[in-house]
Structures are given as C-alpha cells and as structure tokens.
Amino acid sequence: MTHGSAAEQRADQSVSARFTRLMNASTSRWGVLTDPPLVALASSVFLLAFLAALGRDVGPAVARPLGALVLAPIAVALVVSVALRGARRAVVAWLARQPFPVENLNAVLNGLGEGLEVTFAGAVPEAAELNAELDKVHPDAFVTGGVEDARALDIRIGVIDSKRNPAATNHQRYARVRELVERALVPLAERYPIQSVRVK
C-alpha cells in the first residue's frame, strides 16, 4: 500500500460513511439555501404575496409568476442538495492531503466544535509563536491553553454561532478550520512536527 492510499484510507475512516444534508451543506457557502427553515420562510413570503395578488384580482400576468416563485426556494434547495452530494468525497480528499491527521471533523460538519487540540510529535512552540501564525488567519483564533505533558495546545476556532442564521455559521466554522490547518498549522509543522489535530 502506498503512502497516498494509506492517507486516503485514514481520511475515509475518519468521517461518517454517509453525510447528512447538514453535513453536505456545511461544506459550501451555498449550503444555507438547503436549510429547511430558510426554505419554508422564503416559500411562505412568496405564498403570502401570491394570495394577496389573488385577493386583489391582479390578473394571470402577475399571479402566475408569483405562484411559480412559491416553489422557487424548494427547487433551488433541491438543485443545491444534488450539487453537494459529492461533498464527502471532497472532504476526504482534503483530509488525505494534510501532512497530519485532522480528527473529529464530523463535529464541525454537524455545526459543533469550538476549538482544536494540536498534539505535537516533539517540541511544542510557545503560545506567542503559534498565535502569530493564527492571527494571519483571523484575530479571533488564538491559543487558549494546553497540556505540556501531552505536548498539546488548544486553539479557539473563533466562530460565534448565529441565532438568526445557524446554517451560515456552520459553513463559516468549517471554512475557518480549513484555513487554520492550511495557513497556520501546516507551515508550523515544518518547524514543530504535528502528530494530530482534533476538533473539540
């Protein structure tokens, strides 16, 4: 077995065998368009406009387009859902490309996870040095603590849940984790080899 296939196998086993709608949606900025409450809200707004138009007897030239708009959010959600069916394959490919395991990504894909636990293979960098790398990604991502005996540091992902639009927050968290790994931790691993990164 080659190194590449071993990495792919490890990545494949590290995430759910089947992605739910939520998990697929979290991987894309367009995933929010599949969020059931948002779809229902958009459809209900168009439905009210359609019913109001019928009540005023505006004629078929106006009523028909409004009637079609009632179904538009559902149609868009279906199209986006189909387009995101390959999300798991893309996630596995990304995980396999990383020079260290990224564990428990399922949590992020399900809208959970507030931090990353980075375990180093040997020497552990100073928090200030790691913070300098994290700040290049986002100022809200920083070292929150660590366990010296375990050669681990905890990092805050720094995405605050939105009560109005949690589906969009899910994608922001997923995108932030990818950025933290690619732009901060991968370069850092060249100086301080990383054993694993785990979502907490």
Image (cartoon, rainbow, N blue to C red):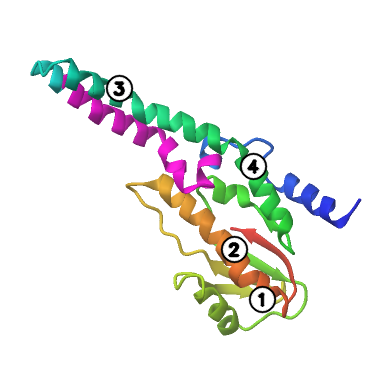
State the CA–CA distance, disc 2 to disc 4. 21 Å
**The disc label shown at residue 68, or none:** 3
**In this picture, is 192 found above or below 33?**
below
Point 83% across, 50% down: residue = 5
Residue designated by label 2: 116
Q: Label 2 amino acid? A: Leu
State the CA–CA distance, disc 3 to disc 1. 53 Å
Asked whether the viewer can see residue 114, the reply is no
Magenta highlight range: 24-51
Q: Label 4 amino acid? A: Arg
Point 47% across, 42% down: residue = 31
Tag 2 and tag 4, C-beta contact below 8 Å: no
**The disc label shown at residue 188, or none:** 1
Q: Label 1 amino acid? A: Leu
Of labels 2 and 3, earlier in sequence is 3
Of labels 2 and 4, earlier in sequence is 4
**The disc label shown at residue 88, or none:** 4
Of labels 3 and 1, earlier in sequence is 3
Residue 111 colored magenta? no
**In this picture, is 116 found above or below 88?**
below
From the image, state whether disc 3 or disc 4 is nearer to you. Answer: 3
In the shown orientation, is residue 158 left or right of residue 70? right
Name the element at disc 3.
Answer: helix
